[in-house]
Amino acid sequence: MLTLAIETSCDETSVSVTDGENVLSNIVSSSVRLHKKYGGVVPEIASRFHVEYILEVLDKALESSGKRLEDIKLIAVTNGPGLVGALLTGVSLAKSLSLSLRVPMIGVNHVLSHLYSAFLSGAEKPKFPFIGLVVSGGHTALFYCRDSYKQKLLSQTQDDAVGEAFDKVAKILKLGYPGGPVVERTAKLSQGRERVKLPKTFLGKDSLDFSFSGIKTAVLYYARKSKNVDDEAADICYSFQETVIDELVEKAMRAAELYKVKSIVVGGGVAANTRLREKFTDAVRFSGGIKVYFPEKKYCTDNAAMVGVLGEQLYKRGHRSDLYLSAEPNLEVLNA
Ligand code: KG4
Ligand code: ZN
């Protein structure tokens, strides 16, 4: 079903054309360079960027898919969670297209689209049931995904999201924005974790919840006390990255054992991290048959293709949105 999808929840303006799990085009234009000097996304700048570029991105997505607007059978759009001004651009465009083309429209939850983005890759598709781990700039959560896109929230972060923690550590160490890729690169220059000790947050023996604000504060204090923080940056990044990844891997593995499932699916911007992929791959090697699935790196960070693929699945399962669809900054994932 030829689907035009729109994603504008944060700082990526993206439009794609998908057909089932086939991605015919996926254009992503990011305002990230405009936020760099502020060390984080400035909502007003992100919103303006979407308004300015969305039509250009739409044209490019159609052109590179080889399709025309008249061919489109479904409009899928991220309607939350995210920055309200940013979401509004996508939702308004989706409504105008749906109305003028007389095709149905479906609102898609951004966290869910990350959760199911591993289905976009050409390689082996994940099989239900699985444990889903979403690790992005705004969310860190574990889900039990039963079958046919039905999921239950198991746990989430009690404070910062893991991507946000990467961004803050980069800011403390003056490494630039976004933090994830630069912290990963800087950590590669380190000799090993023994040089800097950072605490793990303990939330109770059986808890599957996450917490990353403690380690972020520990990095802040360490950096303040350090005689030469630039020299120590690599060791700090290494220790930070190892500690937070261990927490993610440990809890996802524990959830898989608890729910007796053989697959773990990871999604969201932090899933692009090579060390995270390595540590998961190592952990499942000794797990008696658990497999871990990742989206291709280009589908880890925000993109419209994941919205289109999930939107079509939900539509086929009877979900619908009407022209009263609103932009919901705090949209929650419903247990289904
Ligand atoms: O999923 P995403 O594009 O947007 C949200 O929905 O938040 O994720 C962005 C987050 C940022 O915090 C960024 O620093 C992080 O993903 N990120 C990474 C890497 N690439 C992006 N974190 C760790 N390692 C990476 N290679
Ligand atoms: Zn995202």
Image (cartoon, rainbow, N blue to C red):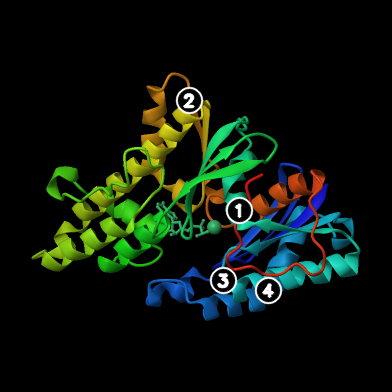
Q: Is label 1 in a helix, a strand or a loop?
A: loop
Q: Amino acid at mark 4?
A: Thr
Q: Amino acid at mark 2?
A: Ile
The structure residue drawn at horizontal position 38% and vertical position 77%, both measured from the top left corner, is 37
The structure residue drawn at horizontal position 19% and vertical position 44%, both measured from the top left corner, is 193
- Of pointers 3 and 4, the one earlier in the residue sequence: 3
In the picture, the disc for residue 89 is 4
- Closer to the eye: label 1 or 4: 1
In this view, 173 is above or below 51: above
- Of pointers 2 and 3, the one earlier in the residue sequence: 3
- Closer to the eye: label 4 or 2: 2
User: Label 2 to label 3, Cα distance in Å?
Assistant: 36 Å
Q: Is label 3 in a helix, a strand or a loop?
A: loop
Residue 150 x/y as whole percent:
66, 41
In the picture, the disc for residue 290 is 2
Badge 3, how many Cα within 10 Å: few under 14, some, many 20+? Answer: many
- Of pointers 1 and 2, the one earlier in the residue sequence: 2
In the picture, the disc for residue 83 is 3
